[in-house]
Amino acid sequence: MTGPRRRQHSFPAIARCVGGWRPEIQLAKISACSNPQELCRTSSRPNATNPSTPPAWAARFVCHRGACVMSIASPILPVGIDPSRRLWRFLFCAWGLLGGLAAPSIAVATPPATEAAPTTREYRATIDRIRTGLDAGRGAEAAQQLTGTPVDLRSFEFDYLQARIDGLTPGAKAAPDLIQKLPKPDVETRYGVLNETNREVVLICRDGSLRVHNLKTSEAPPRKVAHPQGAAVWTGVCTHDGQTFFSGHENGDVLVWDTATWKLRHSIFLGTKWAVRELACAPDGLAFVAEGQKELELWSLAGEKPEKVAGVGDRLNFGEGLAFSRQGDRIATGGMFDIVVRDARTGAPQQSLRHASYTMGLEFSPDGKRIASAPRGNVNKFLAVFPVDQDRPLFNAGPFGNYIAGMAFSPDGSRIAATGCEKVLRLLDATTGEVVYSWPRPECGARPGFSQDGRLLGWTEPDGYRFIDLGPRPE
């Protein structure tokens, strides 16, 4: 019988045996178990006073039918130790090791990664060869290879490479990378939010202002609007129809802006001096979910005045994850462990999904049938995609060199753009988790976003907003 694999993370668990030799067992990083009965053994270290003594104890993990069980192997006692003491040794070592299980980041349950079809792997390999050729100025060779790629596997990376080929001038040593930069303003800026309908980006500034740039004319000065009292902006989000922008502020206000005129529609107060750090909105702007003073709050703007619908989870010191489906029928909340999918009209829970600790990055797919999860922290450096109605991911990609700090689905749902502090921007296949394309970057990245036509990809770096605009799609 086979079962899902479980990838285990490092965690300390020290057990000292009583009497005789006193080894110090320290769990090493445990690799994934693909066989249900495979044992992942730890390293054992003898006492410094007797380094020649062989290991007497070993910890093991047995993976079976989705559960991972830790047990202590029977001791192999050194010569001269009374065998009657084996039971006490066992109990004390088990007690010490099990104490480590209290840590919140001990393990992340992962099913087997979806095996990529050979054509997907071949496509990725071809894309890598094309990129290498373009970096060396071999445009004709790259164009021939690109034309031969399977049509059903193409997405933004195909259009991007085609644009690089088109931009290669005779005699050039390399094709242009097409990455443009919008410099950061002269105030502290958290990140930029892309309006996917009109190619505008809204910079979230700590001085309480929103600075609106049109990426078609990025050199032009931005339009500037601000909180009436100058309260610092902590977060912002734009509706999928592009007509409404929500900003969360340090003083507990949520402001609702009309993006055509940038005049205020609503100001909703959620709690004295409690910054609104997390915010998500309905695709038509008639509802939102945000951090309140004590809990996550779901609000409706469909009536004559804003109305709180329900509390939908606890406010946590380290933050939470929030997402609103593009159909407007579901919201998702994350926090310490579970992702909870809820009815967007009432806030009632519909499904609980277990990924890992600190589920603070959430994003619905364009069709609303999947949800991407990227936990935060130094342990859970994964990205998973779940069907919204199943507590079992389609894949769990990683671990990466650092945690994922931002995600965005492409409009066709075939790709996920992922940023973080690993100094790389990735495009992942949204079905298999394969990294199809990546851009090395000099700094950390955050808040990626696609335009609705799938021809623009933007993200934030410390020195400004970066974007690749491929222009109108060729006829």
Image (cartoon, grey):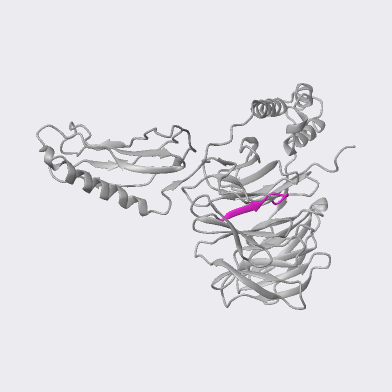
Decide: is 54 above or below 202. above
Q: Position of residue 113 (x, y in %)?
A: 55, 36
Question: At which x and y percent is residue 96?
Answer: 27, 49
Quarter of the image for residue 416 reads top right
Q: Please state the total of marks drawn on the protein image.
A: 0
Residues 207 and 152: in front is: 152
Q: Give the answer, above or below, for where 203 lies relative to 176.
A: below
Residue at 43% in and 51% down: 105
- Looking at the figure, which quarter contains the C terminus? top right
Residue 313 appears in view: yes
Q: Which residues are magenta?
A: 360-368
Tell me which corner region of the image, top left, top right, bottom left or bottom right, holds residue 209: bottom right
Q: Is residue 217 magenta?
A: no
Q: Name the residue furthest right.
A: 475
Q: Nearer the viewer, residue 436 or 334?
A: 334
Of 280 and 222, the residue lying toward us: 280
Question: Where in the figure is residue 271, as x and y percent of width and height?
Answer: 59, 76
Residue 230 seen in render: no
Position of residue 423 in the picture relative to residue 78 (left or right): right
